[in-house]
Image (cartoon, rainbow, N blue to C red):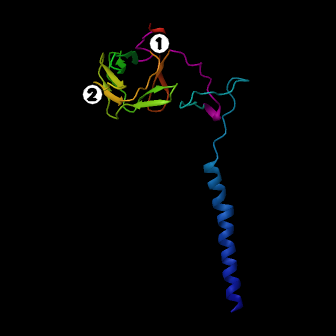
Amino acid sequence: MRPRETRGRRNWRVIVAVLVFGVLPLLMAACTPPAQPTGGTPGATPVSPKGFVITPGPAGRTTPVPKPAPNLELDPDKTPVAIISLTFAPDGTEIVRVANISNTEQKIGLWSLYNPRTEKRFDFPLDTTLQAGVAVQVQSGPGAKGEPPRDYLWSTESRWTDPVQEDVLLTNQAGRMMFWYVASTQH
């Protein structure tokens, strides 16, 4: 009877050892946030606005990227899809107009409008495509309504707070900023 109990205990110890030394490090690695990349510009710390991607370069080094800046002029060669206005109607409807300013069709499925002040985001449906020269509206606020494919309903709650000081970001499906609209530059 005694050898059987010893063999059972030995097997149990082997199972515990495999779990502790084999599986536990994998679980800890999966739960630990990745280390920040090093390199890039000497003395510079890779910084990214919340929700945006830092693109690593070769050997894990951060690619130096110029500081993001608002788009003050529409240039289809740089950004074929642009935010062209943010308006506030008397009934409380907030309307963001997004347009294809290029001469070719642009797929914007899963692109997002993002308010960095409130961290609210609207995602365009997967199959959204803008033909050349076409604009769509994304509505929010108490009077908002949606009639896709030209008008999208974001929410019947207000998403923008200040028609003069508001920033509106347009990000692609990877989270990269494609256009930065600043309302104060339009008034």
Depth order, front residue of 156/183? 156
The residue type indicated by label 1 comes to: Val
> Is residue 173 placed above or below 19 in the rendered structure?
above
> Is residue 82 placed above or below 3 in the rendered structure?
above
Q: Which mark is residue 66?
A: none
Residue depicted at 70% across the width and 88% down the height: 3
Q: Which mark is residue 149?
A: 2
Depth order, front residue of 12/85? 85
Instruction: Name the quarter where the N terminus is drawn.
Output: bottom right
Indicate the secondary structure of the residue bearing disc 1. Answer: loop
The residue type indicated by label 2 comes to: Pro
Main secondary structure along the magenta-highlighted residues: loop
What residue is shown with label 1?
Answer: 164
The picture quadrant where one finds residue 6 is: bottom right
Residue furthest out toward the right: 43
Residue depicted at 69% across the width and 73% down the height: 13
Residue depicted at 39% across the width and 29% down the height: 157
